[in-house]
Image (cartoon, coloured by chain):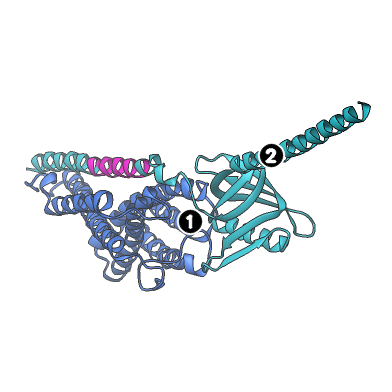
Amino acid sequence: MNKVPGYLDPLLILSTALMGCALYLIFIWVPTETNQGAIQRILYFHVPIAWGSMLGIFVVSASSILYLWKKDQKWDRLAVSSAEVGLTFGAMMLLSGMIWARPVWGVWWTGEAKLTTALILFFIYVAYLMFRSYFPPGTQRQRIAAVIGVIGALDAPIIYFAANLWSQAHPPLITGPAADADSTLGSELGIVLLMSTFAFTLLFVYMVQARYKIRRSEDDIVDLKRATTTPGVS
Amino acid sequence: MNTKLTGAKTGIILFMAITTTLTAIFIASEVSIAKASEESILSGIVVGVETDSNGKLIRLAVSDSSGQITTFEFSPKTQFGLENQAGDRWISSLAENPSEAARRLNDHRKRFAPITVSHANGIASSIVERQEGKLETNLGYLFAVFATTWILFFAYVLYMGQKQRVLQYEITRLKNQLE
């Protein structure tokens, strides 16, 4: 049994401290962008959250492949934990994007490529978790869920490249390997975005770790209940 | 006497005509100055571009940052200064190239690229890339994003903490039952 209270988890303390630094940089340190004004500061939340949602599906996919290969329960637990946290990040990505789009584009939602593929990612998470909830427990459920997880990850690179593949409302890529050199953020804006991404990545890891512990406890309870109902097992 | 009176009358009439003409010119110039100063500016997103069968611009609908839609018509003198996605600026008037103006505005509509319209009495006198808007002071949306994000994240972390405590209690209970 874990004797350390949850709020003393070193990962939570570190991610909270980094988030505090990121908030200071976002609201106090970084200069206001000239075109959009203060609203542009949503970028430092929206992009790291979007990164978290894509990281989630990559972890689901990698864990699913490892589960199919090794047949070890821990990979299945990691996949489902990452899917649930990824769903949370995906929902936040869509919400923050919609709230940002309203004043800047004049609409809450539009059918452009990046938004549509991001919504598809959200539905992939929902489908994955719904399948796990409704399908009878067992190895078959875990195997099919793993396949869904692997296929679902194909959407992540499409989201990343959508702005370059279909030039629409989203600006060209500003971060990552395919970013246009002319469109990258300035040094100060880039530092804040990097810091915020790092803070949200740690928060993501903490949340997946916490969800993993819950999943392991749920499996322990199933085993203990089986032991209590089976005669001669202690 | 009559001749003198006629000359005086002519002089008065001439004086009044000149005065009236000068007054009319002055009033006309004042009206045009007043009209120029009445010109307003609106920034927003193009939400509709209406053209005739020849592709010539008829009307333009612009949504501002509060979501209010304003419709504008054009005059042949309407000036344009619009950039494409690469940042190349196109400067022209409606009379010079009406179909290109419609194409550029449709491009802005598809890209959600903001514009600024100078207008008077519903007629747009110039349409350029966004020069001025209320985005700088529109902080409600910024607050909404941060508040929503943090409330959801904290709620989820608290939910996980609570669930973990319940599960630990159940594990302890079952272990005690086994012993």
In the rendered image of this protein, which colour is used for chain A?
Answer: blue
Q: Count numbered badges in the picture.
A: 2
The reply to whether residue A136 is visible in this rendering is no
Q: What chain does badge 2 belong to? A: B
Q: What chain does badge 1 belong to? A: A
**Residue A36 colored magenta?**
no
Please name whichever residue, B34 or B67, is drawn nearer the observer in this view of the structure: B34
Q: Which residue is mark 1?
A: A115
Which residue is pictured at 83% across the width and 32% down the height? Answer: B13
Which residue is pictured at 75% across the width and 57% down the height? Answer: B56
Q: What is the span of residues highlighted in magenta in the rendered image? A: B144-159
For badge 2, the amino acid type reads Phe
Question: Which mark identifies residue A99?
Answer: none
For badge 1, the amino acid type reads Leu
Q: Please state the horizontal and vertical placement of residue B69, each as a whole percent of the image.
A: 60, 41
**Residue B151 colored magenta?**
yes
Let me know if marks 1 and 2 both belong to one chain.
no
Tell me if label 1 and label 2 are in contact, CB under 8 Å: no
Q: Please state the horizontal and vertical placement of residue A27, each as a whole percent of the image.
A: 27, 48
Q: Please state the horizontal and vertical placement of residue A129, each as a whole percent of the image.
A: 38, 51
Q: Which residue is mark 2?
A: B26
Circle 1 residues within 10 Å: few <14, some 14–19, many ≥20: many
Distance of mark 1 from mark 2, alpha carbons? 58 Å
In the depicted structure, whether residue A186 falls above or below residue A86? below
Task: Name which quarter of the figure residue B53 lies in.
Answer: bottom right
Quick one: SS at disc 1? helix
Please name whichever residue, B1 or A85, is drawn nearer the observer in this view of the structure: B1
In the rendered image of this protein, which colour is used for chain B?
Answer: cyan
